[in-house]
Amino acid sequence: MKTLILFLFVLLFIPNCKTERKYLNQGTIKIIFTFDNKSNKLDINKSMNCLSSRLEKYCGLKPSLLKVKGFFQFSVSGSIDSMTLKNLFLLKGTFGLWDTYDYTDIIQMLDKANSLIGRLNLVKRFTDNNDSLYSFDQKRYPLYNKLVPLLKTNGTLREGPHAGLALMQDTALIDSVLKLPSIKNLFYKDLLFLWYAYPTVGYYLLIPLKTYSKIKAPIDNGMINSVSIKKEADGKDLLYIKLKNGYFNRLDTLTMFSLRRYLVSTIDNHVFSIDKQMYVSENGEIFLHCIQGITQEQLKLLESILSFGELQLIPKIRSIYVEKY
């Protein structure tokens, strides 16, 4: 059987969460939350079912629900990290498996963007307070002072699914300029740029994705039949994503056209996997082989989120506490 193995470099995001991580156990975990007042009842019910299913999948026990004066409370026994619990509630869970463009596919477009930035009198935005990874001719290559090309040790361009490396504080500026209509029109119509948090803290890699239609991923949540964790003979854990009948051909087509490129997996438009080892199972299974320090909690979190589709409404968490036994 052929398989598709993606080596995961996982980065999960928690919106508007600044509380420190702590482990919740030795009691009943209580999560009190609300939804926006304008939310309709149908969307709330769908979201409640999704949240309940995520909790049950992760903790192994069905949570009990209490509703009082517009507030909802889930109670569940078990042990869970507070950061993981917030991820279960605050991640929408939008999954995408994408084809990518290679740097060599877009280098000429990036060069043209440098020239256009000069003609649009935007050079100063890329040179003021310049704290770049590498110094380029500021007039000729203003963009490269913030979005630095990846080079090999011999000075030649490094191939791969990237458009350059940037400091975290420069990503907003780069995004805003690349979205200008005159600059956006320089690139392929089906190209979508997303950031990937580089292993070195504070650095981000810009990934050029190839969209399917209307900025959609070729493989998304609606095509997932089931998700599970299985263990290989060597003891390593694999995340199995089985597609619904009717979507196997799309997976075959995606990997066939990606033979010289990479496949990228995303959750909520954040890149968490980049890999070139592409094989397709005969029954529509994708095998995600997690390495590089991914924890069992992170793997279990992915399984719990991807098993139940996208969360319709993102709740507002009011409090989380443990009621001791």
Image (cartoon, rainbow, N blue to C red):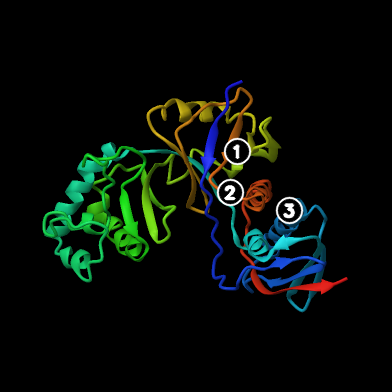
Q: Where is residue 63 drawn, in percent x and y?
A: 81, 60
Q: Where is residue 162 drawn, in percent x and y?
A: 34, 45
Q: Where is residue 52 drawn, in percent x and y?
A: 75, 58
Number of residues whose C-alpha sits closer than 10 Å to that of mark 3, classed few (under 14), some (14–19) or many (20 or more): many
Q: In percent of the image, x 48 and y 52: which residue is there?
A: 269
Label at residue 58: 3
Q: In percent of the image, x 68 and y 50: which residue is there?
A: 304
Task: Give the residue at mark 1.
Answer: 223
Quarter placement of the N terminus: top right
Q: In percent of the image, x 48 and y 30: which residue is there?
A: 277
From the viewer's perspective, is 324 left or right of 225? Answer: right
Of residues 140 and 256, the one drawn nearer to the viewer in this rendering: 140
Number of residues whose C-alpha sits closer than 10 Å to that of mark 1, classed few (under 14), some (14–19) or many (20 or more): some
Of residues 181 and 280, the one drawn nearer to the viewer in this rendering: 280
Query: Which comes before the other along the chain, label 3 or label 2?
Result: 3
Distance between the alpha carbons at the discs numbered 1 and 2: 25 Å
Q: Amino acid at mark 3?
A: Tyr
Residue 34: image quadrant is: bottom right
